[in-house]
Image: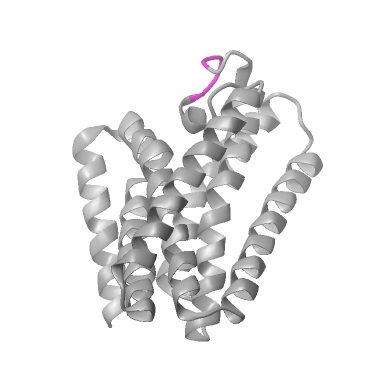
């Protein structure tokens, strides 16, 4: 989690925010998109947490066993729902970067994979231990992947037919949403599992590796 967070921070800083500023040559569109993305993710996450029977989705990954109030099935389902929420801005950013650069941003792609792999394992284990069939679990995750793919397609399509300032807002919007997601879920979860020292080192290593890969 900490390593993936570091990779994502580097990716949004150098692949999204920097690219957005280069396109617009103005700070205003970048700030508008960045703040809007963070607020949008926070509001959507809060709304879903209020409506979800599993409780606060923002703290879904802390819900292991019976702590979530409904057993491992609740934890697994909450992680799945939360993962879909996290994946929307990440995959939109991937689609936007593809439209702008003509190729997939490998650093961002790696960051998305690294950050979602442990979520998939935890969610699947929780749902399977509560009696859900492997077929149903596979079907649910297939749906989550489809939502991510649609998000990428939306990001790609929107970016293909808009002017530079709008593209800058779209890129920074995704960056703001990702940064808030890191602060609300991934980094706190990493801290809960490994402590402050591990989190700090993991973020540093992830950031460093992403920076190296992005400049080689």
Q: Is residue 211 magenta?
A: no
Q: Position of residue 57 (x, y in %)?
A: 54, 30
Q: Is residue 66 magenta?
A: yes
- The answer to which image quadrant residue 83 occupies is top right
Q: Is residue 97 left or right of residue 131?
A: left
- The answer to which image quadrant residue 211 occupies is bottom left
Q: Is residue 77 left or right of residue 15?
A: right
Residue 138 shows in this picture:
yes
- The answer to which image quadrant residue 68 occupies is top right
Q: Is residue 153 left or right of residue 216?
A: right
Q: Which is more toward the observer, 27 or 115?
A: 27
Q: Is residue 51 above or below residue 156?
A: above
Count the labels in the image: 0
Q: Position of residue 159 (x, y in %)?
A: 57, 75
Q: Which is more toward the observer, 145 or 164?
A: 164
Quadrant location of the C terminus?
A: bottom left
Q: Is residue 149 above or below residue 76?
A: below
Q: Position of residue 204 (x, y in %)?
A: 21, 54
Among all residues in the image, which is located at the extreme bottom?
A: 102
Magenta part mainly helix, strand or loop? Answer: loop
Residue at 32%, 76% in the rendered image: 214
The boundaries of the magenta stretch are 63-67
Q: How is the image coloured?
A: one colour
Q: Is residue 95 above or below residue 187?
A: below
Residue at 46%, 59% in the rendered image: 173
Q: Position of residue 11 (x, y in %)?
A: 36, 65
Residue at 30%, 55% in the rendered image: 6
């Amino acid at each position: 989690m900490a390593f993936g967070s570091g990779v994502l921070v580097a990716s949004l800083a150098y692949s999204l925010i920097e690219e957005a500023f280069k396109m617009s040559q103005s700070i205003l569109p970048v700030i508008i998109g960045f703040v809007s993305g963070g607020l949008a993710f926070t509001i959507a996450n809060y709304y879903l947490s209020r409506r979800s029977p599993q409780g606060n989705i923002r703290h879904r990954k802390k819900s292991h066993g019976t702590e979530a109030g409904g057993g491992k099935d609740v934890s697994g389902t909450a992680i799945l729902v939360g993962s879909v929420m996290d994946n929307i801005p990440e995959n939109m950013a991937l689609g936007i970067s593809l439209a702008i650069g003509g190729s997939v941003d490998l650093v961002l792609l790696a960051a998305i994979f690294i950050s979602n792999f442990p979520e998939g394992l935890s969610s699947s284990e929780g749902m399977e231990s509560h009696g859900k069939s492997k077929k149903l679990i596979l079907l649910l995750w297939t749906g989550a992947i489809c939502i991510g793919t649609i998000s990428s397609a939306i990001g790609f399509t929107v970016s293909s037919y808009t002017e530079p300032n709008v593209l800058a807002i779209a890129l920074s919007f995704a960056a703001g949403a990702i940064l808030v997601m890191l602060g609300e879920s991934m980094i706190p979860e990493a801290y809960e599992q490994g402590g402050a020292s591990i989190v700090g080192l993991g973020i540093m290593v992830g950031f460093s590796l992403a920076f190296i890969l992005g400049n080689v």
